[in-house]
Every structure is written in structure tokens, then in C-alpha cells.
Image (cartoon, rainbow, N blue to C red):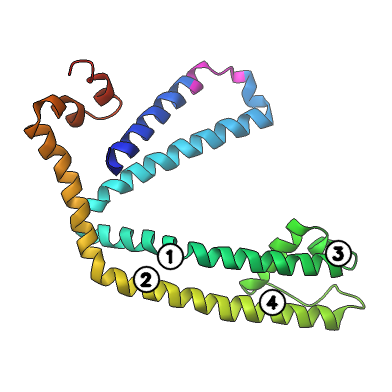
């Protein structure tokens, strides 16, 4: 059960389920917005899994594999950093909502609105207007938020990504060869062990049905 078998199996069963769903669903249900949204979300999931399965096979292509592995490593290394960023934005959102929800409800009327406004501010989309009577305190807090999130945290993120990239320059080729060996090993096992041959050589879900023949 390597990564390719898992992605093949997941994609196969999701596509079978999608065909059954689309062929059996009542067309009148598409007129209901909630039902239509659920069908759309399911089809988006199927589409994303199919594309992930497509890119999984590029892990055995040397020129592309190293880039994909570097991207995956960057995502993994930034998970802890993203947790810190989310906590910081939530803390600042609670402060801004408490202080300015009555002054400017369009920006800070609720926690969700404040989180969106502060996230926009962290990427440089902010202004100091619309705060009658609270200009000084709002400007001071916003300057602190932008300085901490846009300057300190973003440069910290760049440093993490740079370190990950440098590390992957050394280990990327080795990880590519590991994936290539794992991919070739599945077929070596198929030809060496005749009892596993039918299961491995056929794509899912046919490979699971051939288990009966074995």
C-alpha cells in the first residue's frame, strides 16, 4: 500500500461514486441551492483527488520531483509557524473587536469580520479612516499589528522557507531516488511473487477484484 496505490484507490472509488451520484440524482434537486452546493463540493473533492493522483506520478520524474518534494517540505515546515500566526491574528482580532466594534461595525462588527480585516492589513491592505474619535488608538494598534505581522512574521516565514529550500537542495535528489525505488519495487514484487502479480499490475479498483482469483 504505497502512496500511488492509495491515490489510485481513492481516485477510483470517488469517481465511481461520482458517476453513480450524477446518474441517479433527481434533476429537480439541482434547483435547491443547498443540494446543488453539496454536489458541487463533492465534485470539487473528486477533481482535486484526481489532480493529486496525476501529480503523484511526477514524483518519479527527476526534474519535477525535486520541486514537488521541496514544496511539500515547505508546507510541512510552516505548519507550526501558521499556528503562531493564527493565534496572533485571533488575539489582535479580539482586541480590535472589543475596542472598535461600535465605532466601525463594517470592519470590526464581529470576530470573523475583524479577522478578515486584520489579515488584509497583514498583507498591506489597510487604512486609518472611518474611526471617528478613535483615530489615535486605532492607528497605534494598527501600526503595531502591521509591523509585527507584515515585517517580523513575514520575514520569519521567508527565513524558514529559505532554510527548507537549502536543506532540500541536499536531500531532494535522495528523496527522489527513494520514491523511484519504491515505485519500481511494486512491479519487482509483482514479477517476483506470482501470487501478488494480478493485484499489483492492474489499476484500482480492478486490483482488489482480482484478489478473488489469487
- Distance CA(mark 1)–CA(mark 3): 36 Å
Mark 4: few, some, or many residues within 10 Å (few <14, many ≥20)? Answer: some
Q: Secondary structure at mark 4?
A: helix
Q: Secondary structure at mark 2?
A: helix
* Residue at screen point 45% across, 36% down: 46
Q: What label does residue 145 carry, if any?
A: 4
| Magenta-highlighted residues | 21-27
Above or below 207: residue 97: below
Q: Position of residue 181 (x, y in %)?
A: 16, 50
- Distance CA(mark 4)–CA(mark 3): 17 Å
Q: Are marks 1 and 2 in contact (CB under 8 Å)?
A: yes
> In the displayed structure, does residue 1 sit left or right of residue 24?
left
Q: Are marks 4 and 1 in contact (CB under 8 Å)?
A: no
Report if residue 61 is visible in the image. Answer: no
- Distance CA(mark 1)–CA(mark 2): 7 Å
Quadrant holding the C terminus? top left
Q: What label does residue 77 carry, if any?
A: 1
Quarter residue 134 falls in: bottom right
Residue linked to disc 2: 164
* Residue at screen point 51% across, 64% down: 80
> In the displayed structure, does residue 21 sit left or right of residue 100?
left
Above or below 123: residue 33: above
Q: Is residue 23 magenta?
A: yes
Amino acid at each position: 500500500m504505497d502512496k500511488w496505490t492509495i491515490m489510485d484507490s481513492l481516485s477510483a472509488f470517488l469517481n465511481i461514486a461520482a458517476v453513480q451520484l450524477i446518474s441517479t440524482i433527481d434533476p429537480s434537486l439541482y434547483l435547491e441551492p443547498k443540494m446543488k452546493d453539496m454536489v458541487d463540493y463533492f465534485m470539487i473533492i473528486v477533481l482535486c483527488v484526481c489532480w493529486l493522483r496525476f501529480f503523484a506520478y511526477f514524483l518519479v520524474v527527476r526534474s519535477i520531483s525535486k520541486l514537488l518534494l521541496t514544496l511539500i517540505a515547505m508546507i510541512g515546515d510552516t505548519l507550526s509557524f501558521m499556528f503562531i500566526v493564527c493565534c496572533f491574528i485571533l488575539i489582535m482580532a479580539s482586541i480590535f473587536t472589543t475596542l472598535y466594534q461600535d465605532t466601525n461595525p463594517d470592519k470590526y462588527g464581529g470576530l470573523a469580520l475583524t479577522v478578515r480585516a486584520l489579515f488584509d492589513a497583514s498583507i498591506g491592505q489597510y487604512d486609518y479612516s472611518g474611526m471617528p474619535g478613535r483615530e489615535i488608538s486605532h492607528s497605534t494598534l494598527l501600526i503595531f499589528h502591521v509591523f509585527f505581522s507584515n515585517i517580523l512574521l513575514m520575514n520569519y516565514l521567508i527565513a524558514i522557507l529559505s532554510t527548507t529550500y537549502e536543506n532540500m537542495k541536499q536531500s531532494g535528489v535522495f528523496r527522489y531516488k527513494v520514491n523511484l525505488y519504491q515505485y519500481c519495487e511494486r512491479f519487482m514484487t509483482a514479477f517476483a511473487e506470482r501470487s501478488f502479480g494480478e493485484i499489483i499490475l492492474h489499476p484500482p479498483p480492478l486490483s482488489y477484484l482480482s484478489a478473488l482469483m489469487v
